Amino acid sequence: MALNGVFQRPYTVRDNRQFVRKRGDEENAATQTSREEQGNQNSKSKGLQYVEPQKTAVSYPKTDDKPSWQETRALIQNQAHNRIQSQQNNLAGGNSISAAPAAPASPYANVSSNINIAQILKDFKNTQAAIGTPDNLKEEVAGYLDLIEKQVVKDNPDKRLIKSNLKNAASILDNYISETLNKESKVVENWVDALFLQQIDFKYNDNDINPQFLVKFPEGSVQQESKIEDKSVVNESTKETLTEAENPKVASIVPQDKTLKSMFIQAKKFVYANEPEKAITSFGQALERAREVGDNETVSKIYFEVGKIYDNHDYYAQALKSYHKALETDDNNLKTKAHFSMAQIYDDTNQIKPALDHYFVSISYAGESDNPVAQSTSLTKMGNIYTDMYEQDAFNYYDIAQDLAAQTDNSKVKGYISSSLAGAYNKFGEPQEALKAHYNAVQHYTNAESPLKVAQNFTGAADIMIEYGNISKAKGLLKKAQNFARQTDDINLMNEISSKLASLV
């Protein structure tokens, strides 16, 4: 089916933002965006139509349509706190607790990820009442909840049984919501999935309440009127993939079986030789071998590799299906990349809600594998989405991304964040802040030895100077851009810079 307007980015110009660029000005900047897309290893939106997979439900820590920056920061702080606590516990086991590093001071240090089963059951029943569940469905749900309540009063509750029954009960409510709205809903199941990622106390205590995990409903649920409307698409944000920002922890999984390893490597050779059909055929053979030897991790890795092939050739439906299948793994790094790749597809096709969802999940799994670079990249992508919608929350996402990137020595991701910030400040009519961000981006990209990015940021800064009439400063910046552009093979950029210099008479 053709892409519709649901969750697409609205193009709005706020009256109180006198410096906001008009749409035509943004379209003139498309050439720079196109250059950055040339190095993109993931999806490249070309406006093509695609059919979304019928089953795209995923388990992720999401409770409403838009993951707020507060929720994102709380999630990251919780993960950091848990890692520190784990390190302290490990040191304590080795009788070296005094050597444990102190947890960094943070305004979010007291945010807890603990939740008692009593709160979950109460919220579940409130949810059932709120959506007006019919009596016959209430009886079905009550049957599952009764089994749970018998377990939670025991000294050693059966956690697997509790989770299974809670999922079954959630499925009943979501089916009812779907029938009522005449569209698929996973709001209750997603809420339950989010809870499963937390520290659940399965021993019933109705006095233990954590307000952070009270159930919320997305726009369009039976509690609210649907406000979906066709919205125009704005220019895409800067395209720079997770591949560029990955740290050494995100390494390829090499099969142990010699035959499978050989087949996997051969398939990769076809990829590098730009022979996608042969690569997919070869990966298909490797998949059969992986299943034959019971190597499920390589199965997931193969699906991810196949997803990338489809993705790079704009077969988005097939790519999404492959990425989803890649999620059947215990490797959080692979889950991070798969969710990021799916987010890229939705982002490139301006499907806001699923893009934000998958970026958020990518952040979560990256945190589990202690990968702040990947987290920073996804956070910046989310900031770019909010920037395109002229929402001030964008700066909160950039702020968290910068905090995480500061913990690393990855100059490239720091440059990407600063460059994205420059674009956001410029769009929101803050040229001075935009210039500062461009300057920071230049410093980071210089350290990363990325002359193309340095040239682009000097050019961006020059454009601001031209817009505000400082021609002398603009010329100086363009000459610097020209010097760095000459270190690249980007002829278009060099010609563009030369043309701009020639026009400044």
Image (cartoon, grey):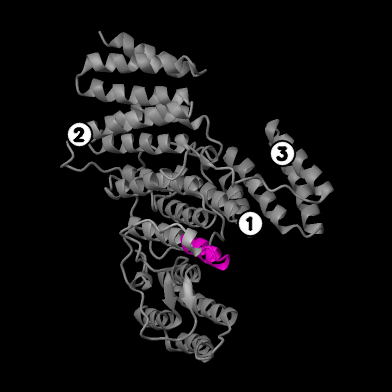
Residue ID at (59%, 43%)? 248
Q: Disc 3 vs disc 2: which is toward the camera?
A: 3
User: Can the viewer see residue 341?
Assistant: yes
Left/right placement of residue 181 relative to residue 165 reads left
Q: Amino acid at mark 2?
A: Phe
Position of residue 386 relative to residue 430, above or below, is below
- Count of picture labels: 3
- Give whichever of 100, 19 is nearer the camera: 100
Q: Is residue 93 magenta?
A: yes
Gap between marks 3 and 1 measured at Cα: 19 Å
Q: Position of residue 210 (x, y in %)?
A: 36, 74
Kindly identify which residue carries mark 2. Answer: 19
Residue annotated with mark 3:
268
Residue range in magenta is 83-96
Q: Secondary structure at mark 1?
A: helix
Query: Mark 3, mark 1: which one is toward the viewer?
Result: 3
Task: Compare residues 433 and 175 and report the one nearer the observer.
Answer: 433
Residue highlighted by disc 1: 325
